[in-house]
Image (tube, rainbow, N blue to C red):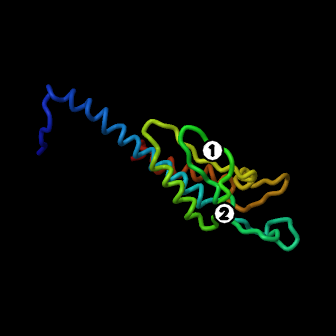
């Protein structure tokens, strides 16, 4: 049995209330959720250096600590950020926390960005360094993250 919560006369006012309050709240919440899932996938999917694949004699250069690319994912609103964070985050937790915190401030109906400005981020994604394949990550892993997020939130599939 259904419960009547409005009348035909009150419906326009109720609908206006939903349009003003609930839809922006829903849209804002979905935007944040999608942004966080995308950031999580990018951060945790970023490979942390594999010295066995490098062309340095003996592997890693002196002083190398993996996680520079993983630590440089940055979330922003309105425009992509410029520059690097300087963060080295091998496990990814610190970077994920910073991006989740930034996503919490995304206003409804805005544009958000997830950027990584290390000069070799495309090499990690495309698997090529000159004519050399790096194979540190699955080829086009960033696109794979985006495909997974789209599939997760695809309302047509529900």
Residues packed near mark 1 inside 10 Å, few (<14), some (14 to 19) or many (20 plus): some
Left or right side of 48 for 105: left
Left or right side of 152 for 85: right
Position of the N terminus by quadrant: top left
x and y percent of residue 7 in the render? 13, 30
| Residue at the image point whose x is 68% and y is 52% from the top | 84
Rounded to the nearest angstrom, the CA distance separating label 1 from label 2 is 18 Å
- 65 and 157: which is toward the camera: 65
Whichever of callouts 1 and 2 sits on the residue coming sooner in the sequence is: 1
Residue at the spot of label 2: 88
x and y percent of residue 126 in the render? 73, 51
Element type at marker 1?
loop
| Residue at the image point whose x is 74% and y is 61% from the top | 135
Residue at the spot of label 1: 81
Left or right side of 47 for 44: left
Residue 46 against residue 151 in the figure, above or below: below
x and y percent of residue 146 in the render? 56, 49
- 101 and 49: which is toward the camera: 101
Outermost residue on the bottom side: it is 58
Residues packed near mark 2 inside 10 Å, few (<14), some (14 to 19) or many (20 plus): some
Left or right side of 130 for 41: left
């Amino acid at each position: 049995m259904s419960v009547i919560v409005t009348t035909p006369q009150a419906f326009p006012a109720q609908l206006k209330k939903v349009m003003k309050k609930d839809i922006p709240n829903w849209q804002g919440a979905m935007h944040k959720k999608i942004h966080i899932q995308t950031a999580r996938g990018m951060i945790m999917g970023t490979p942390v250096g594999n010295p066995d694949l490098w062309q340095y004699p003996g592997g890693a250069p002196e002083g190398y600590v993996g996680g520079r690319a993983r630590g440089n994912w940055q979330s922003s609103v309105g425009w992509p950020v410029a520059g690097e964070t300087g963060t080295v985050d091998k496990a990814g937790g610190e970077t994920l926390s910073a991006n989740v915190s930034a996503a919490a401030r995304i206003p409804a109906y805005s544009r958000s960005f997830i950027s990584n400005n290390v000069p070799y981020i495309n090499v990690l994604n495309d698997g090529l360094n000159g004519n050399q394949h790096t194979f540190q990550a699955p080829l086009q892993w960033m696109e794979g993250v985006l495909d997974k997020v789209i599939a997760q939130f695809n309302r047509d599939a529900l």
